Image: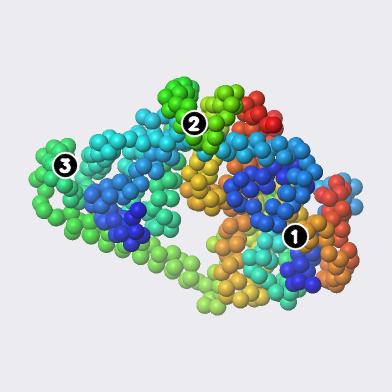
Amino acid sequence: MMKADEERELIERARRGEVEAFMQLVREYEHRILQLTYNLTRNREDAADLTQETFLQAFRAIKDFKGNSSFLTWLHRIAVNLSLNFLKKHRHASNYLEDIDGLEEKGRGAELAEAGGIPSVEDSWLSQELRTNLEKALEELPPAFQATFSLVVQEGMSHKQAAEVLGCSENTVSWRMHEARKMLKKKLQPFLSIE
Amino acid sequence: MKKSSVIYFSIITIFLLVSFSEIYAQGHPPRGNKRVRENMFVLRTLRMTQALDLTEAQTAAIFPELNRAEKEKAQLQADLAREIRELRQLINNKKVEDREFEDRVAKIADLREKIRSRESEFEKFLFTQLTSAQKARYIIFNIDFNRGMMERMGRARLAGKENK
Amino acid sequence: MKCERAQKLISDRLDGKLSSWRQKRLDRHLTTCEVCRDYLLSQEIIQREALKTEKVDYPPEWWRQFEQALQAKIIQSTPGEEVISVLPAGISADISDIKGDKNSNKKGRSWAFKTHARQAASLLVVVVVAATLFLIIYIGRSKNEELPLPLILSYEDSYFNLSQILAEDEEAASNLARSLEETIIEETLLAGPEGTFIDIDYDFKTDNYEMVPEILQFENLNSEEGL
């Protein structure tokens, strides 16, 4: 992980037009941005394209980066905006089918290990049904709510951090999380087996 | 009795007095925008007290003028809203003469000027009661509060649409 | 506590955003409300599943190609602007092919002077504009007169914009008023663990209104009539 002053120096050099300095920043954060765009789009190719577009836009705009937030937060903001615009235009169902295949390829062993135990056959099936329908339900959330949920739950950001990325207040993040959870529960009720 | 408790209780009392006085005067709860204005005033006062960390002496000096200014501005805002409503209806009426439009526009401009002037007058008074640090906090508080209200309104509109 | 409110607190709890006193209030509600207990359990399950997101990654060769393509796009997308390209051998040849003959004819570091001249010109414009604004605002005013705050920010202007929108949406106005009331109650009813007011005996006279009530009870604030 890059140190803060090292990063600052690279940013300064990138602002002066040094591509290689910028590429070092890219190498530092490309994995995280790819994961974020994938969480939002659920499609590898789209995520890769959006990741590249994120860095392209970042380079073009780096002269405007004032350092009020961290560089990663700034990148997150660009990535989220691009992803939301993309989703508004291109949301489709094929992602859902591709991800079912992906889950099957991963195999039962990995799923069981993640679940932290060896549930019954029925439990595994319910869990997988929940999982695949959860991904569908997440895709069907309004884009701003989906982005908020993804940043807070999947990226592990605090409300404050997510608010910085999304350009809204903490209260808005808090409210969106509540509304998103209500919507998800409504859609997933048939798959939530509560003993 | 903690200073903050005293301040909060006096604020909630103002809130109750405003709500109850409306009810007793009119026989029914205040309608939408009026309730919004009153509630915003109470919440803003509460938050401002916290943000500026006002002392008891400061609240005793500021609150009366705050209430006076609020009553005047609330009335002016209500008058302005009414003028604008009426202007909207007039705009599409081809029989209205230019003079009528001139008068209406002048009245709206006058109301706007009065609101701004009263706001400025209150804030000048407020600044005579605050320390330098409190003045700085007031500016930031105002920006944050205004922004928070617009976001809250957005959510209120969205909640209404989802219920339909 | 109403269930809608409790479920909002459940959401905040899952995100680690709940204060300790609110945790206690929520816990008290949960001991008596099965609906909210089920809601909490459902949300914990959803949260757990959402955290099992598929991790996506590619092998190092893929990332190398990704970076090369990005670098090429960066240079290609900034025509007319020189970018400093301090590249490893091999890549610079590829990039110069993409840029073409136009750029290869430029002298060594002439961009440096152009960039600095551009920056100096921008700075001069900013200084001139700032000075002009300063003169406009302060000329004609007495030295003792402060800049009115409404010129900087205005609560009343903000309220006006808001009220114009709400004038056409009574439902939104009601929702907003109710939301504000809930916040006021929440932020002021922090007095005791049971949510009741402490008795007060406060003398607050103004020119416009009389003494406040001596005792404020929780029940009064919850009544439909009052709120």
Q: Residue at x 39, y 67 (%)?
A: C131
Foreground pick, A76 / C174? A76
The label on residue C91 is 3
Q: Residue at x 88, y 63 (%)?
A: C215
Q: CA distance from mark 1 to mark 3?
A: 64 Å
Q: Which residue is mark 2?
A: A111
Chain at tag 3: C
Give neighbour class at mark 1: few <14, some 14-19, many 20+ (Cα, 10 Å). Answer: some
Q: Is residue B98 left or right of residue A103?
A: right
Residues under labels 2 and 3: Cα distance?
42 Å
The chain containing the residue under callout 1 comes to C
Label 2: few (<14), some or many (≥20) within 10 Å? some
Q: Position of residue A194 (x, y in %)?
A: 68, 31
Q: Amino acid at mark 3?
A: Ile
Task: Please name the amino acid that badge 1 sits on.
Answer: Leu
At horizontal 77% and vertical 62% (from top left) the residue drawn is: C191
Say whether marks 1 and 3 touch (CB < 8 Å).
no
Three-letter residue code for mark 2: Glu
- Viewed as shown, does residue A20 lie left or right of B126? left
Q: Is circle 2 on the same chain as circle 3?
A: no
Q: Nearer the viewer, mark 2 or mark 1?
A: 2
Determine which of the numbered discs, if any, sits on residue C126 in the image. none
Q: Quadrant of residue C126?
A: bottom left
User: In the picture provided, is C175 more to the left or to the right than A60?
Assistant: right
Q: Indicate the position of residue A171 as horizontal and vertical percent values.
A: 61, 50
Q: As displayed, is residue C54 above or below residue C204?
A: above
Residue that mark 1 sits on: C190
**SS for callout 1:** loop
The answer for which chain carries disc 2 is: A
Earlier in the chain: of badge 1 and badge 3, it is 3
